Image (spheres, coloured by chain):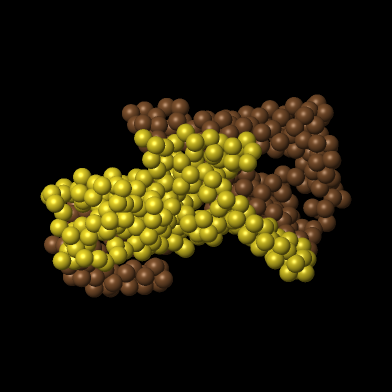
Chain colours: A yellow, B brown
């Protein structure tokens, strides 16, 4: 199925949803991290050059640590995301939704070298396009996945209005459809709301031609369903 | 129960969990409040109820987000302790290497074969060295070990530090690449093993040909014990990754690769440690002009015996 949503069951028996992140935001995140690393090198190179050859040695040490372990440190100690991933709203998690640990993070970031081959993340992108969870080779060897951070609450609320008892009993899916309609009411133009409400004419008993009345009626039913009665 | 009543009766618990989670996210490693697990389980229950009763997408999203964050705090991995690291050094690492004996031997063959072949032929056919290295590099390598070369004269301490940084950056980088590219069906590791064998063999052969071995062997023997062994082990770790894809056995390829990654990374930890030791030796001991060549040869021999002993014997006793 063409879907990037993966339900994960926790030991408590509830499902939480992970949304897998594809190649494009991840490449942007990698680019941001590259810019940050290069920036740090520029900052470090001047004090290092003042220290002569010894400073050069320290600079090479810093470069070694940054090239291989910059992502590891952020992924394990700073909530699963490098600054680039944070900016793009991405997060590295184990497939069961738990935060990534040292071992998995080190493996996925060492194998990054193979992902980068033959040039510009060639194998990594190929692997992401084949795998249904967008995993690159490093993820396949280590276990974790990269997911979208859950967005901040959009704050949809059903506007209050006089409750209307539906003319027929509604099953759960029908109730859900009415509530979803009411929650998103403010995001469409009036004409579109009326058009959508027209679909529910058999329920409201108001013909699509009197669009705006249908909207009011559906909103009333939503209020009734929410228990504002 | 209607949604409004549901929200009203549980809002306080959700707020409390939110506060708890926020504090844990900020403190990292801090202790959780004693009621955190219980609160978390209750909210899990609320999420299941909200889904079942179709209370609405926004409430589900809010609870899902809260549960996800709580989940990450409750099940975050604890940092490994120092005792575990010590156990790995004294027993775990050599045991791991012994359990991969066949791959280590294969890796040794891929590395030492070209090295020895090059080392033996280049003294008689010196132009062969140019087939793997550019002329300038060969020239420079030779000059370094000449009787009046840079090594003989000794060098200042900050230059030692520069070389230390370089050895860490370059050598551990090579080892990581040798390991990582093993995921391409082992081909990458095989390439790096053979290529490094050829280069090191060519340099050795060239120095032999120039007659500078009197400076070269005392220099190379000490850190070589750790460095050459580490390259072979990095290759074996890469071959483990590749083999899991070629021959996954009873597992699926994905599962076999995960298992191989877990095994191989232990080896890579050990390799990184060995190469750090090698870099120290190479920068501060091997090149030291104060230590006579004979002492370097003796110490180097002892280090080789030590490394062999470590991998053959350490960690064999029961119960440790």
Where residue A164 sits, quadrant-wise, is bottom left
Tell whether A98 sits left or right of A175.
right
**Residue A70, position as x, y percentages in the image:** 56, 57
- Residue found at the far front of this picture: A209
Seen from the viewer's position, the closer of residues B155 and B69 is B69
Seen from the viewer's position, the closer of residues A110 and B66 is B66
One can see residue B57 in this view: no
One can see residue B200 in this view: yes
Residue at position x 75%, y 38% in the image:
B203
Q: Is residue B64 above or below residue B189?
A: below
**Residue B296, position as x, y percentages in the image:** 68, 52
Residue at position x 80%, y 41% in the image:
B137
Seen from the viewer's position, the closer of residues B71 and B28 is B71
Residue at position x 13%, y 49% in the image:
A168
Q: Quadrant of the N terminus of chain B?
A: bottom left
Where residue B198 sits, quadrant-wise, is top right
Q: Is residue B223 above or below residue A219?
A: above
Seen from the viewer's position, the closer of residues B1 and A69 is B1
Tell whether A206 sits left or right of B209.
left
Q: Is residue B194 above or below residue B143?
A: above
Tell whether A174 sits left or right of B248.
left
**Residue A60, position as x, y percentages in the image:** 68, 57
**Residue B89, position as x, y percentages in the image:** 45, 53
């Amino acid at each position: 199925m063409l879907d990037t949503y993966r339900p994960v069951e926790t030991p408590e028996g509830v499902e939480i949803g992970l949304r897998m992140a594809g190649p494009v935001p991840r490449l942007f995140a990698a680019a941001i991290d590259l810019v940050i690393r290069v920036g740090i090198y520029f900052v470090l190179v001047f004090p290092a050059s003042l220290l002569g050859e010894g400073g050069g040695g320290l600079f090479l040490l810093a470069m070694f640590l940054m090239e291989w372990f910059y992502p590891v440190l952020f992924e394990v100690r700073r909530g699963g995301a490098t600054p680039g991933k944070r900016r793009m709203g991405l997060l590295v998690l184990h497939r069961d939704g738990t935060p990534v640990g040292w071992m998995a993070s080190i493996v996925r970031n060492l194998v990054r070298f193979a992902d980068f081959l033959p040039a510009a993340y060639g194998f990594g992108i190929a692997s992401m396009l084949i795998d249904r969870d967008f995993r690159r080779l490093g993820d396949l060897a280590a276990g974790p996945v990269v997911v979208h951070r859950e967005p901040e609450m959009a704050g949809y609320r059903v506007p209050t209005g006089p409750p209307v008892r539906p003319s027929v009993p509604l099953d759960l899916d029908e109730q859900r459809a009415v509530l979803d309609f009411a929650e998103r009411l403010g995001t469409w133009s009036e004409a579109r709301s009326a058009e959508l409400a027209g679909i529910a004419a058999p329920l409201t008993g108001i013909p699509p031609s009197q669009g705006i009345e249908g909207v009011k009626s559906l909103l009333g039913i939503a209020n009734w369903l929410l228990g504002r009665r | 129960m209607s949604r409004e009543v549901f929200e009203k009766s549980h809002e306080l618990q959700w707020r409390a969990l939110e506060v708890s989670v926020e504090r844990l996210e900020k403190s990292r490693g801090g202790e959780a409040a004693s009621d955190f697990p219980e609160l978390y389980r209750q909210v899990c229950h609320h999420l299941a109820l909200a889904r079942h009763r179709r209370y609405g997408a926004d409430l589900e999203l809010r609870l899902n987000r809260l549960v996800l964050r709580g989940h990450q705090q409750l099940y975050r991995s604890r940092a490994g302790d120092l005792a575990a690291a010590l156990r790995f050094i004294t027993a775990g690492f050599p045991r791991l290497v012994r359990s991969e004996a066949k791959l280590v031997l294969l890796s040794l063959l891929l590395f030492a074969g070209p090295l020895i072949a090059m080392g033996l032929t280049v003294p008689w056919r010196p132009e062969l060295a140019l087939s793997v290295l550019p002329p300038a590099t060969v020239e420079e390598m030779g000059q370094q070990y000449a009787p009046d070369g840079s090594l003989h004269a000794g060098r200042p301490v900050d230059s030692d530090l520069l070389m230390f940084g370089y050895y860490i950056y370059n050598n551990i980088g090579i080892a990581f690449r040798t390991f990582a590219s093993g995921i391409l069906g082992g081909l990458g590791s095989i390439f790096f093993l053979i290529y490094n064998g050829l280069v090191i063999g060519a340099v050795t052969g060239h120095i032999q040909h120039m007659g500078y071995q009197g400076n070269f062997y005392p220099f190379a023997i000490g850190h070589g014990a750790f460095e050459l062994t580490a390259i072979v082990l990095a290759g074996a770790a890469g071959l483990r990754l590749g083999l899991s894809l070629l021959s996954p056995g009873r597992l699926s390829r994905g599962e076999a690769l995960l298992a191989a990654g877990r095994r191989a990374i232990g080896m890579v930890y050990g390799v990184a440690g060995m190469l750090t030791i090698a870099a120290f030796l190479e920068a501060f001991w091997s090149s030291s002009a104060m230590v006579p060549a004979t002492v370097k040869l003796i110490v180097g021999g002892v280090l080789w015996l030590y490394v062999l002993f470590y991998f053959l014997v350490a960690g064999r006793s029961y119960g440790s």
